[in-house]
Amino acid sequence: MSKSFLALVFLAICPLLIAQQALNNDAVIKLVKAGLSDDLIIATINAQPGTYDTSTDGLVALKTSGVSDKLVTAMVVKASAPAPAAAPAAATAMVGTNPDDPAAAHEAGIYIYRDGAPAGSKMAMLEPSIYSQGKTGGVFASAMTYGIAKIKMKAVIRGAHSNTRIVEAQPTFYFYFEQQGAGLSNSSLAFGGTSTPNEYTLLKFDIKGDTRETVIAKANAFGASTGTEDKASTGFTYTKIRPGVYRVILSAPLQPGEYGFISAAAAMTSFSRAFDFGKN
């Protein structure tokens, strides 16, 4: 295996292993040179904190390095955005007092709504689990094809089964976001900068010994991309109930197994959260 091929593969994988930390001009340039699309890089800029040099010299350096005007604009907007203001007291007031009522105010998170449960309708919060990009697959195939075959990066969660269990094949989910404006959530919050279910994918995990894993990104000698495998994804639709609150309906019944909601922006980090549960 040539040194040049190893260098290309490392260059492709490296951006996906960036921990969730403040981005800067150099980090954006690395993502551009790795071949990631403008839309994906902009999603990362919006989702993560960043410190950008938008001076005349900084902008010239970005342009010289091949950063598009679209990306530069996103960096300038992010650098000039004011800190999010505290929500008015009226906006945070309880809509109801019943914790099993979706209309009541809830702590930010993803909840399963169990309509018609034995003890009445119940809402259960999905406690997030930390996952790491701890495994890669396809390395040998990539080597044998001189970098054409893709290396797969996998999200790995400790434990073969989630602590949250359901028996319903098609439960309803409710998403409660801290911020109510699309794309404006602060990345330090529990949802990591997301503000709509459209930024999430529901994935089925493969059980491997005492861990659960699923593919979240791929890379080869020609570039890298985030993306899950179609066979692991479960489709859903969502309805906005009120600002910051969404009802999510699955497109098809769930088969027994281990599942989790993962955001597209989180797939770019080495450590992030999966809102996981298991279907008995």
Image (cartoon, helix red, strand yellow):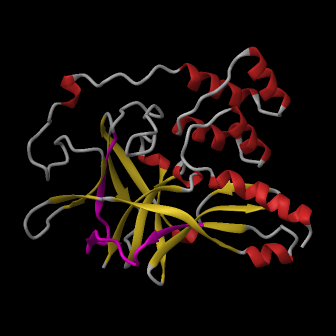
| Rendered residue at 53%/35% (across/down) | 49
Rendered-image quadrant of the N terminus: bottom right
Segment colored magenta:
154-177
Q: Is residue 214 visible?
A: yes
| Rendered residue at 40%/30% (across/down) | 181
Is residue 254 placed above or below 200 in the rendered structure? below
Rendered-image quadrant of the C terminus: bottom left
- Res 125 quadrant in image: bottom left
148 and 10: which is toward the camera: 10
232 and 129: which is toward the camera: 129
- Residue 57, position as x, y percentages in the image: 78, 18
- Residue 238, position as x, y percentages in the image: 38, 49
Is residue 1 placed above or below 120 in the rendered structure? below
**Left or right of 275 on screen, residue 122:** left
- Residue 47, position as x, y percentages in the image: 52, 39
Q: Is residue 221 visible?
A: no
Is residue 152 placed above or below 223 in the rendered structure? below
- Residue 7, position as x, y percentages in the image: 84, 59
| Rendered residue at 83%/74% (across/down) | 143
